[in-house]
Image (cartoon, rainbow, N blue to C red):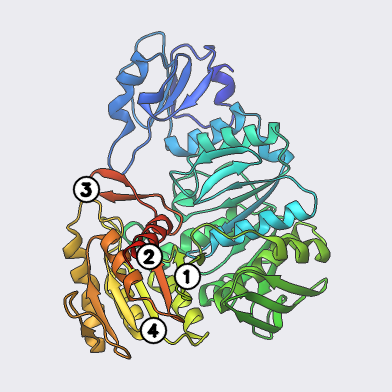
Amino acid sequence: MRVSRLTENILPLNTRGPVDMDITGICYDSRKVLPGDAFFALRGALADGHDFVATAVEKGARAVFAEKDVSLPDHVAGIVVADTRMAMAQAAVTFYGNPASAMTLIGVTGTNGKTTVCYELEAIFKAAGRQPAVFGTVNYRFGEIVHAAPNTTPESADLIRMMAEFRAAGADILIMEVSSHGIDQHRIDGLLFNVGVFTNLSPEHLDYHHDMESYFAVKKRFFTEFIKPETGMSVINIDDPYGLRLTRELKQVWRCGCSSAADISPTEVKTAFSGTDGFVSCPQGDLHLTSKLFGSFNISNLMVSAGAALAAGIELGDIERGLAEAPQVPGRLEAVENDRDAFILVDYAHTADALKNVLTALKELNPPRLLIIFGCGGDRDRSKRPEMGSVAASLADIVILTSDNPRSEDPEAILGEVRKGIEPSGMTEFFRSEGFFSGEKGFITIADRREAIRYAVSLLVAGDVLLVAGKGHEDYQIIGNKRLVFNDKDEIILALNEQEVSE
C-alpha cells in the first residue's frame, strides 16, 4: 500500500519525500522494524519514539510518522501529524482493510469485572453458534489462535492486525476489554462498537488519571464517541453510582441493577460457594440464571453479560445455556482443590473496591475463619495501599501482607504503607514465631510471596477460606527490573504437596 493511500484518513501537518513508496507493514517499536515498514514515533511514559527514528530508518523504514520534523534521508517519506497515536490507529484501519466493518463489536469497560464479563459473553456467543474472538487482560484469542496480552487493550496497530487475522480465520464477533489507557491513548480510534458495557468505577490508575473525575471522563468518552450513534446500545450497571450518572447522559441504554429503575434486574437470586441460581427480569422476558460464579458483585457481572448478549441479538435460551456452561475464569475466584476441607481461592482483586467485593462475598457465606494474602504493586497508584489494608482488616480474620509486583520499589516500604490502613483498626500484629491462635484475629507481614503462601497454607484447618489476592492469572512477579516466573495457584499446590509429605 502506498504512503499516499495510507494517509487518506489522516490530516498531516506536513508531508515530504516519496509518498508513492509502497508500505508493507506498520510498526511503532524501532527494534521490530522490517524493511518496507511505516514507523510511527510514539511518545511514551519512559521513552520517546522520536529518539529512535534513525534506528527505524537503518532497519529499512520507508516512511516515518512523527509529531515534529525529524531528519530523514531523501528516500524515506516523512509525515508530520498532530498525534502519532491517533494517526497510527487511522492508518492501521486503512492498511488492514477495516476488519471491524465485517464483525459485531462489543466493548467492556470499568475498573473491575471486565475479564469475567468477556468470558461470560464468549461462552454465550459460542452457545448461540457464533464465532467470538476476545481481546483482554488474560490473552488475545480466537479458537486455537492465542497471543500473549502485554496490555489489556493492545496498541492500535497490533489490535487491528490481530483483528484482521481473527476475521480471516472466521471470527464474526469481537469482545474487547476496553481500558482507560486504551481510550486515552487512541488505541481504539477508528472503531465503532455495536454494544458497550460499563461494569463499575472505583479508584485505580490514579497515578495516570490523577483524580476520579478525570478517570470517569475517559470512561464516558467510550460511550459518547465509540458506540454506533444510531444502532448501538449501552448496557450499564446502575448499582454503581458512576454507572447511574452515566446513564443520564446516554440515549440508547439498558440499565442493570437492583433498583426499580433497572431494565434488567435480579429476582429470587441465591448465591453460594457452589454458584448462583435464580431469575433475571429482562426486556425480552425472564431469564433463568445458573452460573458457577458466586457473590453479589458477580450477579452484577452476570446481568450486564446477559444484557450485552440481548443487545447483540442473542436469544434468552442461548444466554441461559452459555452462562451455565461458561468455564472458570482464570484467576477470578479460581478454586484450588485440597485435602484440608478448606476453600482456597485465587483472585485478581488489586484495588480496594475489588478486595471489598470479594471479601464481602466470602464473608456473606459465613466461613468459620477468613484468611487473606495480598500486597500492592510498586510504581503504581500509592493512594490505594492504606485503603486496601483498611478493607482487609475490616473483613478478614487473618491478614497476611506480602509482595505483589514491587517493581523498582522496596517491598518493605510498600507494605509499610499498607500497614497504615490496618493499624487504626486495632488489629493485632503477629510474628511467625508466635503464630495465630484459635479465635484470634490479626495480621502478619511476610514480604516473600512464596513464603507467605506456604505460611498461610500451614494455618489452614477444615472450613477455613483462604483468598490469595492481587495477581490472579499472572504467571510472573516483577522484582526490580526482573520478570520472574511465579503463579499463585502453582505455589499453593506446591505448598500443599510439600506439607503433606512433611506430615
* Disc 2 from disc 3: Cα separation: 33 Å
Cα–Cα span, label 2 and label 1: 9 Å
Q: Is residue 114 left or right of residue 370?
A: right
Per the image, the residue denoted by label 2 is: 500
Which amino acid type is shown beneath numbered disc 4?
Leu
Placement of 89 over or under 411, stated as above or below: above
Q: Which mark is residue 395?
A: 4
What residue would you read off at disc 1? 339
How far is mark 4 from mark 1, CA to CA? 25 Å
In this view, the residue in front, 73 or 267, is 267
Mark 2, secondary structure of its residue: helix
Q: Could you say where residue 249 lies in the image, as x and y percent from the top left? A: 60, 69
Q: Secondary structure at mark 1?
A: loop
Image location of residue 344, percent across then percent down: 45, 70
Q: Tag count in the figure?
A: 4
Pointer 2 or 3: first along the chain = 3
- The x and y percentages for residue 263 are 72, 76
Quick one: SS at disc 3? loop
Q: Residue visible at 33% across and 23% down?
A: 53
Q: Residue at x 54, y 13 (%)?
A: 22
- 10 Å crowding of disc 2: few (<14), some (14-19), many (20+): few
Disc nearest the viewer among 4 and 1: 1
Q: Amino acid at mark 3?
A: Gly
Q: Nearer the viewer, residue 139 or 12?
A: 139
